[in-house]
Amino acid sequence: MIAHPFPFCGGRYLVNLNSNKLDVFHKYDGSLLASIPQTINAEHDLFISSALSGFAALKNFDASQKAKIFNHVASQLNSKIDFYTQLIAAEAGKPISLAKVEVERSIQTLQVGAREVMNYSGEVVPMDFGRGRGRHAMTAKFPVGPVLAFSPFNFPLNLALHKIVPALAVGCSIVLKAPPQAPLSILSLAAAFQEAGLPDGALNITVCDNQTAFNMLADERYQVFSFTGSDRVGWMLKKDAGKKRCILELGGNAAVIVDETADLHDAARQIATSAFMYGGQVCISTQRVYVVESIAEVFRDLLISETAKIKSGDPNDEFTLNGPLISKEALLRMESLVAEAVRGGATVIAGGQTIDFHRNIFAPTILTGTTPEMAVNADETFGPIVTFEVCRNADHAFELANNTRFGLQCGYFTQRLDRMKTALQQIRVGSLIINSAPGFRLDHMPYGGLRDSGEGLEGIRYAMDALTETRLLVF
């Protein structure tokens, strides 16, 4: 199945590395998909040297050349949708219907990059007053240099492209550390960039252990560090990033609020899907549900009913939404989180147990009677567990939604325009999504969190801003 299970550097796959191998397994049936040579410390200089050479060449490419590359890769990806869909389902355990959506989004990410690069520039600065009279001024954007990026397993293709496309669009070369759990999709796609005319060294993809990754981060020749992952790891890595610019997308514990004006059936359906698809392994999966007391009992029953419809099991079944968790450690963590909450007085009203221990499948789970201090509320569960709590009114729900160290996205089901405005003013999140679960995202949106959820923005154009420096010309 796998065409290129090797690191990619300097425009070619490194097939002769004598490194320790990383075994990548099918997340449902346990079969071996590939053994990939891992980059070791002694080999890292190959990657940064390649990136420096690639930067020197790419920064001279014009917008049309880069747009042509993105459109070519999008076309190649479109011609192999089935291959990449099956590969993502296998290596990441993502249900096949969701894996196909990821491939389609990846195509859109490339197409957005092709459009943005043709419209990206500086600005004219007004000068015709005071001491500026008779002068003109303009700004120009320049790439800052090689980028180091770490991408996550849960969107192994699209989130890798959210690192790659903005970097190449502005003229930065990139070294991407692919997720060890699911590195095959992006490695397989690397050749398409080269075939499209990308200069050698502009795109480099490695797989390595944590110590090698730390050493890469310490290299001052990288100018930007872009990371998507857990808040604990992200903030720790920032401390070691030195003077590099950092873009950190660190997840959260997304809340959703339902008030008495909402379409309750639609809200219950959306929330159940958002909470449990792909085992809740999405940083904007619904984790905390707050419902005003006048509709709480009715909505609780609707949510339980919708949760019961979620099919768990084989990710290759087109009707499966809740497939395997990424690892045994993740499964055991779900068991521990539920046990801790129950010991603290919470009640399980749906699920609460492992369905298939061998395949790491945990039941869609709803807990109630929880407290803000419990890990199921205070931390990012990254699994198929949600909490359901009753609030007095919408204002009380805003307070509860805000009672967290995170601030990525929040959903709010309401028909009241005044409450929408109040929610935007009061709830500290990067995005407030109305009449939708918090998992809504389009790839051109400005996307990023507040507080422990990170810093900086993704979304192609917004990431491009972080990868450039602005210079002013006055004449």
Image (cartoon, rainbow, N blue to C red):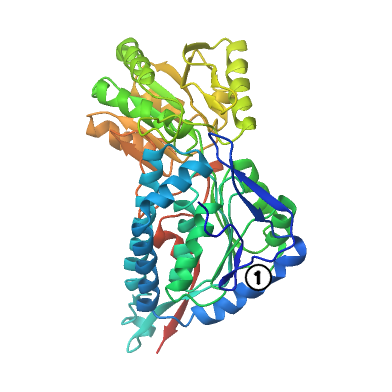
Q: Quadrant of the C terminus?
A: bottom left
In front of the other: 291 or 99:
99
Q: Tell me what residue is drawn at x 52 percent, y 30 percent.
A: 383
Q: With 75 as the anchor, is 369 left or right in this view?
A: right
Can residue 175 be seen in the rendering of this structure?
A: yes
The residue most toward the right is: 42
In front of the other: 100 or 35:
35
Judged from the image, the secondary structure of the residue bearing numbered disc 1 is helix
Q: With 426 as the anchor, is 259 left or right in this view?
A: left
Position of residue 81 relative to residue 254, above or below, is below
**Mark 1 Cα-neighbour bin, 10 Å: few <14, some 14–19, many ≥20:** many
Residue 64 position, x and y percent, is: 35, 77
Q: Which residue is mark 1?
A: 48
Can residue 465 be seen in the rendering of this structure?
A: no
Q: Amino acid at mark 1?
A: Ile
Residue 284 position, x and y percent, is: 44, 38
Q: Tell me what residue is drawn at x 37 percent, y 25 percent.
A: 272
Quarter holding residue 474? bottom left
In front of the other: 264 or 351:
351
How many labels were placed on the picture? 1
Position of residue 222 relative to residue 157, above or below, is below
Residue 321 position, x and y percent, is: 40, 31
Position of residue 58 relative to residue 8, above or below, is below
In front of the other: 17 or 148:
17
Q: Tell me what residue is drawn at x 23 percent, y 30 percent.
A: 416
Residue 2 position, x and y percent, is: 52, 54
